[in-house]
Image: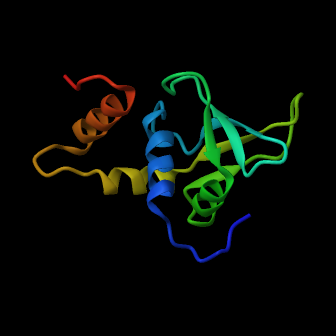
Amino acid sequence: MSQGNGKLRTEDLELLDMLAAAAIDDTDFVPFEYRPLDGWPFAWLVHPRLVGEARVVDLESLARLEEAGCVAFTSDDGEPPCRHAMLTRDGLTRYRRRHQQPGLNQEHAWQADAAAHAGSNPV
């Protein structure tokens, strides 16, 4: 899917932010339903904690995140055929490192980012 250069672009990091903001806890994998759009280089990505319904995401961006070890995929299953894209512990760690804010402990920084992505103000 990707050129394999291993460099993450801004849009990849924004996608990582979206995935991490929907994470429920620190488990190794946070599943997202992934349904490719026939004939297009995009897929629907659905998770109950995402704001709104589903998100359309770039397959190249997902592929670069996979190459970087931030996202993993399951095999096809279900009807219609779908896969699950899963945020890995490495992906969650990269997200937290990127958003670490001086003066806030890690948990408060995580809550502030999650609230910002959800469109609300942190307490």
Residue 120's spot in the image, x, y percent? 29, 22
In this rendering, position of residue 66 left or right of residue 74 = left
Question: Which sits in the foreground, 100 or 35?
Answer: 35
Quarter of the rendering occupied by the C terminus = top left
Residue at x 23%, y 26% (from the top left corner)? 122
Of 43 and 24, nearer the camera is 43
State which quadrant residue 10 falls in.
Answer: bottom left
x and y percent of residue 81 in the render?
A: 87, 36
Q: Residue furthest front?
A: 39
Tell which residue pokes out farthest to the left in this image: 103
At 84% from the left and 48% from the top, the residue drawn is 39
Colouring mode (rainbow / by chain / secondary structure / one colour):
rainbow
Q: Is residue 38 shown left or right of residue 108?
A: right
Horizontal side of residue 89 vs 2, given as left or right: left
- Placement of 54 over or under 72, stated as above or below: above
Image quadrant containing the N terminus: bottom right
Q: Nearer the viewer, residue 29 or 52?
A: 52
Residue depicted at 62% across the width and 66% down the height: 67
Rendered position, 17 above or below 55: below
Residue 116 sits in quarter: top left
Q: Position of residue 38 (x, y in %)?
A: 84, 43
1 is higher (above) or lower (below) than 99: below
Residue 13: image x %, image y %? 45, 55
Horizontal arrangement in the rendering, residue 115 relative to residue 91 (left or right): left
Count all numbered tags in the image, as a single digit: 0
Foreground residue, 23 or 64? 64
Q: Residue at x 59, y 43 (%)?
A: 29
Picture quarter containing residue 84? top right
